[in-house]
Image: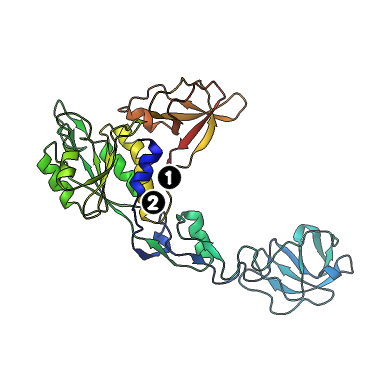
């Protein structure tokens, strides 16, 4: 199965979880279930864009003006500006009645207690009109938008302190294999530390999920069945144990629980053994390879879209294009997602370069990568400067 076909198959029948009210301070990374609307205009009044003087256009170029007051942010001038008058005004302050422009302080001077202007009607008005950012009733953020610091600031500017978001999906991560021990425990001479489990769990967490790490159960089918049956989650990610060896007992355990398989193997490198299924009670199973790089690449390409769909969003990878810093050979029969870095080109433009070691067990390579170059099935060789698809990896 192709990568795109597998992703779509995994998304078939996925419903959006129930919504809940979330305090704005705790909404970063959450997906909106209801729109955020403006309760009033922003700014709610004509406001000064600069420090200076509020005046009437009709008074520009005339005699010195009489200074009658001051308008500051949060404390506007209570009166009105009449003919021959001016009000000292500061950035963000309300424009007084009668005034229709601001003359910046660099273009005016005070002489004998009166204001002398040095600009004509062609000068900028330096006024932010009421509602120029947004208007009362306007939809500022639509359902399916994922909140970030910038969107949270927009909601706050509208006076919103709570938003309605889809509930966080519950994800259980199960790393299998007798060879795997938890970091911090003592490893035997033929064992390795579980690297994929913590990494995949954080991918899920950053995708908005509430994550539980299940205890390691080894390679017994009974243990795997019990772990899958007891996991309280909408999605269970199983790492390893799904290839074709004698000790790969994960899929038999899933079948014993009545799982209906959606995907079994994809034409992808790394990640060929990926599989997905649905248990009779509706819980989703996603099986990723045991090699940590393969597991993390699969989590990026398949787990994130699945979790986004459960929250009403679209988490399909958003590809960019980049020019190659070094040539790439023709690709084979599987789509290849190559770990890559951005490097400056001879013209100063950033280019992308595939890292030399693409072994799916090399976490040092993935940890130093800026993103993934996608090479489609049977893609031709690409010379230096040629354009390739590039998926940036989120850092920080």
- Image location (x, y in percent) of residue 89: 71, 67
Q: Are marks 1 and 2 in contact (CB under 8 Å)?
A: yes
Location of residue 365 with respect to 47 vertically, above or below? above
- Image location (x, y in percent) of residue 39: 54, 71
Q: Quadrant of the N terminus?
A: top left
Q: Which residue is mark 1?
A: 316
Q: Which mark is residue 308?
A: 2
Q: If you read the primary sequence from the N terminus, does the residue marked by circle 1 or circle 2 appear first?
A: 2
Q: Is residue 62 left or right of residue 300?
A: right
Location of residue 106 with respect to 176 vertically, above or below? below
User: In the image shown, does 61 or 221 lie closer to the viewer?
Assistant: 221
Q: Where on the picture, by quarter, is residue 294?
A: top left
Q: Where on the picture, by quarter, is residue 238?
A: top left
10 Å crowding of disc 2: few (<14), some (14-19), many (20+): many
- Image location (x, y in percent) of residue 295: 30, 36
Residue drawn at point x = 84 percent, y = 76 percent: 83
Q: Where on the picture, by quarter, is residue 291?
A: top left
Q: Indicate how the structure is coloured in the image.
A: rainbow
Q: Is residue 308 left or right of residue 224?
A: right
User: In the image shown, does 277 or 230 lie closer to the viewer?
Assistant: 277
Q: Is residue 381 left or right of residue 283?
A: right
3D distance between C-alphas at marks 1 and 2: 8 Å
Please count the marks in the image. Answer: 2
Tell me the element at label 1: loop
């Amino acid at each position: 199965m192709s990568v795109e076909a597998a992703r779509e198959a995994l998304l078939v029948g996925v419903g959006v979880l129930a919504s809940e009210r979330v305090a704005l301070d705790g909404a970063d990374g959450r997906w909106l279930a209801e729109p955020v609307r403006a309760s009033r205009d922003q700014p709610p009044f004509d406001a000064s864009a600069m420090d200076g003087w509020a005046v009437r256009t009709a008074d520009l170029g005339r005699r010195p003006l009489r200074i009658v007051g001051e308008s500051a942010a949060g404390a506007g001038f209570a009166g009105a500006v009449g003919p021959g008058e001016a009000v000292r005004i500061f950035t963000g302050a309300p424009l007084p009645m009668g005034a229709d422009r601001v003359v910046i302080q660099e273009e005016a001077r005070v002489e004998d207690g009166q204001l002398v202007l040095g600009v004509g009607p062609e000068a900028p008005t330096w006024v932010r009109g009421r509602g120029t950012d947004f208007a009362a009733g306007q939809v500022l953020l639509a359902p399916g938008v994922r909140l970030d610091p910038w969107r949270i600031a927009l909601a706050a500017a509208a006076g919103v302190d709570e938003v309605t978001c889809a509930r966080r999906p519950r994800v259980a991560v199960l790393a299998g294999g007798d060879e795997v021990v938890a970091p911090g425990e003592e490893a035997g001479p033929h064992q390795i530390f579980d690297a994929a489990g913590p990494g995949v769990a954080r991918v899920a967490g950053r995708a908005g999920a509430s994550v539980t790490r299940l205890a390691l159960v080894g390679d017994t089918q009974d243990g795997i069945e019990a772990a899958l049956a007891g996991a309280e989650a909408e999605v269970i990610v199983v790492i390893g144990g799904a290839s074709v060896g004698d000790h790969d007992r994960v899929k038999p355990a899933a079948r014993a629980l009545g799982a209906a398989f959606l995907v079994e193997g994809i034409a992808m490198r790394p990640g060929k053994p990926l599989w997905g299924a649905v248990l009779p009670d509706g819980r989703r199973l996603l099986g990723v390879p045991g090699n940590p790089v393969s597991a993390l690449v699969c989590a990026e390409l398949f787990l994130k879209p699945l979790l986004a769909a459960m929250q009403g969003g679209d988490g399909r990878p958003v590809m960019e294009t980049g020019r190659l810093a070094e040539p790439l050979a023709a690709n084979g029969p599987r789509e290849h997602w190559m770990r890559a870095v951005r490097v400056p080109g001879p013209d100063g433009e950033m280019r992308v370069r595939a890292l030399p070691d693409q072994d799916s067990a090399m976490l040092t390579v993935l940890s130093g990568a800026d993103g993934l170059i996608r090479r489609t099935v049977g893609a031709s060789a690409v010379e230096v400067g040629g354009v390739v698809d590039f998926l940036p990896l989120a850092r920080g």
